[in-house]
Amino acid sequence: MAMIEKKFLEAVREFQMFEPGETVLVAVSGGVDSTALLNLLFAHRDALKLTLQIAHLNHLLRKGDAELDVRYVEGLAQRLNLPLTVEAVDVGALAKQEGLGIEAAARLARYEFFERTAARVGAAKIAVAHTADDNVETFLMRLLRGAGLRGLCGIPPKRGRIVRPVIKAWRREIEDYVGALKLVPRRDHTNYESKYLRNSVRLKLIPQLKIYNLNIKEIILQTILLLTEDSLYLESQAAGALEEVRAAAAGDRLTIDLARLKRIEPALQGRLLRLAVEQVKGDLFQLSFRHVRDLLDKLAATERWELHLPGGIFAAGNRAELTISRERAPERETVSYRYTVPIPGRVELAELGRSLTCNFAGQLEREASPLVAFVDYAVLGKELIVRSRLPGDRFVPLGLKGTKKLQDFFVDEKVPQAERETVPVVESGGQIVWLGGWRLDERAKVTAATKKIVRLELT
């Protein structure tokens, strides 16, 4: 068995790429890498119990050469007696439309085509022909552009339904394998144009690095593997932390409790936010280090804020919560509600989709969330009420001496108009006790003379 076949089977087993009985869509460009991938899968299809289908996308970038690529792939499909799907996309036009470079637009078009075709033919996996050389080149490209640990891990062997069975094989091994099959794959002349960063890295940078160490590619590949181990550990930690700070999640919307987030180690906060965006968006395409840094910088803001992220994603926050969603939060209509809150007890605020919990507490909590308030039980009347705000409502904001209209308080605190109707008013004995999530009333605060503490929490 050839070395490349051993590496192919090793990758398939190690990363559990296939399940017996699956249909696999093989992405074939007609180049040497994808030709090798197709033939390796075909040679082992019975042992792996796979059904194969081929997909080819014409990018309409190389005119006559592109048509010859199609003819070549059609010949492979005919020789192996495999079904073939061919489509064409004007990548140049797509790049202008989306404001992307040619390489990024081509990648976007390819994977959209692969996913759509896989869904149509019932393919559980999509096999693409990235190699060890591609992994090294990607590492260097990301290093030059700037990337964090996750980016420097290179190309994952498996993500979702995308699998890369020849990710451990070097290009020279692939060329030898295809040559032994007496096949003559298509050559893409754009692979030798240094105007593209990947080509420049392959044709210029790597040869220069070999001056310092002939085994530089093997060393970089080993570095990628070590970084991947560290990254996977941090990913698992960040995923667990995200569950701890998640306040709510529904469809294309995720809310994070900022008080809990700030207690997470700074090294994990950025990764946690990337995971949150990925859960809402479905991917991290075009999300950069700068975007994550902007989010982190906003966490200490005292005013309402919003950031526009790639892919139509919005992040909006206040002192208490960070919400990541696909659309701006719709303005709420004015609603009227009034509930009696038992002490202790809990009441559902159906109009807001929230709840208020009331319990006795032995002491104050350090670094409590803005969604939690502590009240002196002695100042409460016979009933504790939570209601919608009313015209002319006034209270004494904590730290001040005189009363203030709620309307003026909202203006001073820069609370958006749409959010003001979502702020519950907690009152007792005709006096506001707490403006839920925003400010305690000075008269209700816990003092040294307080004998019994009531803890309020908005969730």
Image (cartoon, rainbow, N blue to C red):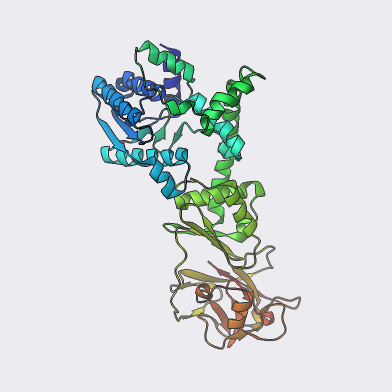
Location of residue 167 with respect to 145 vertically, above or below: above
Residue placed at 70% from the left, 86% from the top? Answer: 402
Q: Which image quadrant: the N terminus? A: top left
Q: Is residue 448 left or right of residue 11?
A: right
Viewer-nearest residue: 436 or 300: 300
Which of 89/307 is in front? 89
Asked whether 232 or 358 is in front, the reply is 232
Examine the rendered structure and indicate whether residue 168 appears above or below residue 180: below
Rendered residue at 65%/79% (across/down): 441
Quarter assignment of residue 175: top left
Location of residue 69 by image quarter: top left
Q: Is residue 180 above or below residue 332?
A: above
| Residue at position x 56%, y 79% in the image | 426
Q: In the picture, residue 148 is in which quadrant?
A: top right
Q: Is residue 77 above or below residue 381?
A: above
Name, please, the residue furthest toward the front.
Answer: 64
Q: How many marks?
A: 0
| Residue 28 in view in this figure | no
371 relative position to 89: left or right: right
Q: In the rendering, at what x and y percent does residue 267 appear? A: 65, 46
Residue 213 x, y percent position in the rendering? 65, 18
Provide residue 373's location: percent of width, then percent of height.
Answer: 63, 71
Residue 345 visible at all = yes
Q: Position of residue 170 (x, y in %)?
A: 49, 20
